[in-house]
Image: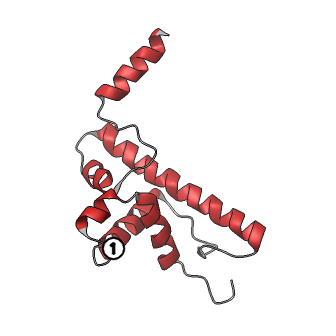
Amino acid sequence: MRIRFLTLCFLLLSGFQLSAELLVKQYREQIKSTDAAVLTFVKLYVQGLGDGIIWANSEVETQMSKHLFCQPTKLALTQSNYLNILDRQIEYSKTLFTEAELEKAPIGFFLLKGLVDTFPCPKGK
């Protein structure tokens, strides 16, 4: 019980926001953080999000014989790739959304859209 209480206190005091989704506003703030723990958290979150999207893409292929996007077979996506794709998609989306809309949007949407735009599938796939 004491360990649970201490863990909860640590999370509350460490500055992490317990949320199901990381919004663009939060991502922008946390990716610039000088706190190593916050920076590590956001980078691992994006990596986990990207890896989950890769798994979802594999399942869609298995179940429907289609792809959400077509990652080159000899390219293993890394945390750095995911962050770059996400940042480029957020930047591009400034032309499509107001700043208020953009800040309230979950980053998962932009990472998925970025992967789809970066690795489009040939027609018929």
Taking the image as shown, residue 118 lies to the left or right of residue 76, namely left
Taking the image as shown, residue 115 lies to the left or right of residue 36, namely right
Q: Residue 71, located in which quarter of the rendered image? A: bottom right
Residue at horizontal 55 percent and vertical 81 percent from the top: 120
Taking the image as shown, residue 97 lies to the left or right of residue 20, namely left
Residue 77 percent location from the top left of the image: 53, 64
Q: Amino acid at mark 1?
A: Ser
Q: Secondary structure at mark 1?
A: helix
**Nearer-the-camera pick, 74 or 104:** 104
> Which residue is under mark 1?
93
Residue 89 percent location from the top left of the image: 37, 71
**Relative to 90, residue 96 above or below:** below
Q: Residue 34, located in which quarter of the rendered image? A: top left
Quadrant including the C terminus: bottom right
Residue at horizontal 56 percent and vertical 56 percent from the top: 51
**Nearer-the-camera pick, 64 or 86:** 64
Task: Report the coloring of the rendering.
Answer: secondary structure
Q: Residue 63, located in which quarter of the rendered image? A: bottom right
**Nearer-the-camera pick, 95 or 80:** 95
Residue 32 percent location from the top left of the image: 24, 51
